[in-house]
Amino acid sequence: MNRDKKTLLIADDHPMFRLGVRNALSTIPWIHILGEAETGISALKLLRHLQPDILLLDLEMPVLDGLSVLQEIRRTELDTLVVILTSYDDEAYLEKALALGASAYVLKDEAGGSLLSCLEAVCTGSLYISPSFGSHLPMAPDKGSKELLASLTQTERAILSSVAAFKTSKEIAAEMKVSYRTVQNHRANICRKLELTGVHQLVQFAKDNLPE
């Protein structure tokens, strides 16, 4: 893909948010917005019809969610760069989106200051992830991993195992029959005990140090 004019489709179920994104992108001379979609189904229909260079995709979409849209894009091998623009700051969603071929994962709270940098990055073939997730590079093995794991309670170990399986906090809460906030509090305690910083490092630690 060249770096001249790029066509773009916005897929989000909130009209005011779509308007805000459209207004922000209207100041970028090399971006041309082809249209908007408010459901996952309409996003796929417009993708096939308009074939944009870039899709800005929310994960929480009616009828068909963003991850399902990503799966269909991957299955049909549509030649579109997908930028996830979401309020989900859960690294399990990040991992799933990247595994399905997303080129970027941007939190809506950070989009105002990072969307342009994100678009520039993906158009040059780079991966872009919101800075609040920390580095997405693999962590070096920690010599004290066993000792750190030993400091976790049985409940914390169970949650860490679910994290390693790329389960979201909502999914873990449903399985454990506790509140979402309770799971988030446990995850915060796990990060503190394991001396981890950055949201992504928890899932990386779980993948590296727990048996499959």
Image (spheres, rainbow, N blue to C red):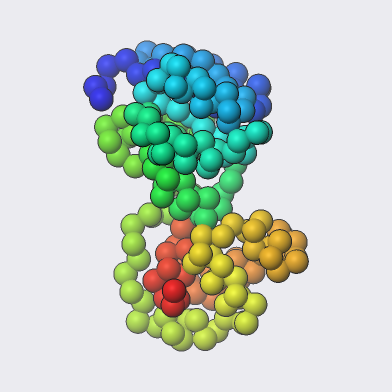
Q: Residue at x 44, y 22 (%)?
A: 48
**Position of 189 compared to 74: left or right?**
right
Can residue 75 be seen by looking at this rendering?
yes
Q: Quadrant of the N terminus?
A: top left
Depth order, front residue of 64/90: 64
Residue that protrudes farthest toward the front in the picture: 76
Residue 77 location, x and y as percent? 36, 34
160, above or below 35, in the image? below
Residue 43 location, x and y as percent? 53, 25
Depth order, front residue of 2/109: 2
**Position of 142 compared to 96: left or right?**
left
6, above or below 67, in the image? above
Depth order, front residue of 99/136: 99
Q: How many marks?
A: 0
25, above or below 87, in the image? above
Q: Residue at x 46, y 70 (%)?
A: 206
132, above or below 190, in the image? above
**Position of 36 compared to 47: left or right?**
right
Residue 36 location, x and y as percent? 55, 19
Q: Residue at x 54, y 76 (%)?
A: 193
Q: Quadrant of the C terminus?
A: bottom left
Can residue 192 be seen by looking at this rendering?
no
